[in-house]
Image (tube, rainbow, N blue to C red):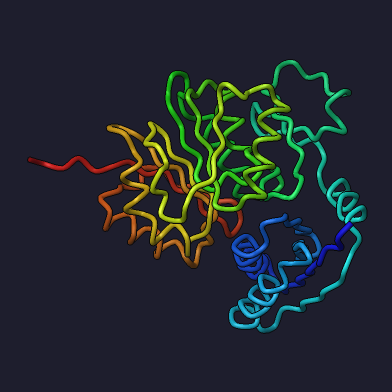
Amino acid sequence: MSPWIEVTVRTASPAELAIAEALASAHARRGTAIDEAASALRAWFAEEERRAVEALRAALRAQLPQAAVELQTIAESAWGETWREHFRTQRIGRIAVVPPWERAGYRDQARVVVEIDPGQAFGTGLHPTTRRCLLALQTLTLEGCSLTDVGTGSGILAIAAARLGAAPVYACDVDPVAVRAARENVRRNGLETAVRVAACGEDLGDVPAADVVVANLTAAIIAPLAARLRALLREGGLLLLAGVVREREALVSDALAASTLRVVDRQTDGEWVTLTACAERTTP
């Protein structure tokens, strides 16, 4: 079995930790874990992703030169156990995000259950942006609405949307590891006919339009994609955006405005911002 690379970043404040999270989300597609009490982050990379490791280190040096960064190699079996240490059942509004090793003992029938194995893809419900997206989805009337999840990661948001009544649901990612993980999670939730998972290009060229479009990415990815995300919205549709740190919010807001998208709701979780936008009506 191939070893994994674990990068630990220790910061001096919650604001710095949020910046480290955003940088890690852009480079570490195998997963991250946050220890808010210790103001520390851990990110994991496959052995063949050393370039991504160096890209993350370079980004941290540029934006958080005072952060302490440590690298170590861990066995694949230890990586799996590390995930289990951090990933327990999460209750987020009406949704319970349950890992496979706790599913048999979970008995709360009042909640919408989403079973997720983090595998090697980002998105477990632990991250503030994922939590905020799950809460935002619960405020929408999804019954009978189509939904497209751009950058699906583990598939958690697409699966939750389907559980909340959205149909059809389309989930896509540029990372083949994420596509495999999302498909497996869709299968374990018995939603193969409700949720379609596919690989997509960075230009989102083959991604279908929908009533609701979700993009839990980063500001650096969302901003240049704003016009394309606008094109994916059906008439009267909503765009749910997350993964934006406060200091990069203006970059995203400006890009949305330039693409005739109007922000109708703004929620925060620490240093993270979640935006809901709709398409401005154009006069003939």
Residue 71 position by quadrant:
bottom right
Percent across and percent down for residue 21 are 65, 62
The residue closer to the viewer here, 12 or 244, is 244
Is the C terminus in the top left, top right, bottom left or bottom right quadrant? top left
Task: Pinpoint residue 167: horizontal percent, then vertical percent.
Answer: 48, 23
Answer with left or right where residue 139 lies relative to residue 17: left
Q: From the top left corner, tell me how far across and down residue 84 is, in percent.
A: 87, 45
Residue drawn at the location 38% of the way across and 61% of the way down = 224
Q: Give the residue displayed 63% in from the left and 75% down from the top.
A: 55
Find residue 271 and report its image quarter: bottom right
Up/down of 213 relative to 163, above or below: below
- Image quadrant containing the N terminus: bottom right
Taking the spot 51% from the left edge, 40% from the top edge, the residue there is 149
Residue depicted at x 83% and y 63%: 4
Residue nearer the viewer, 246 or 222: 222
Vertical comparison of 72 with 165: above or below: below
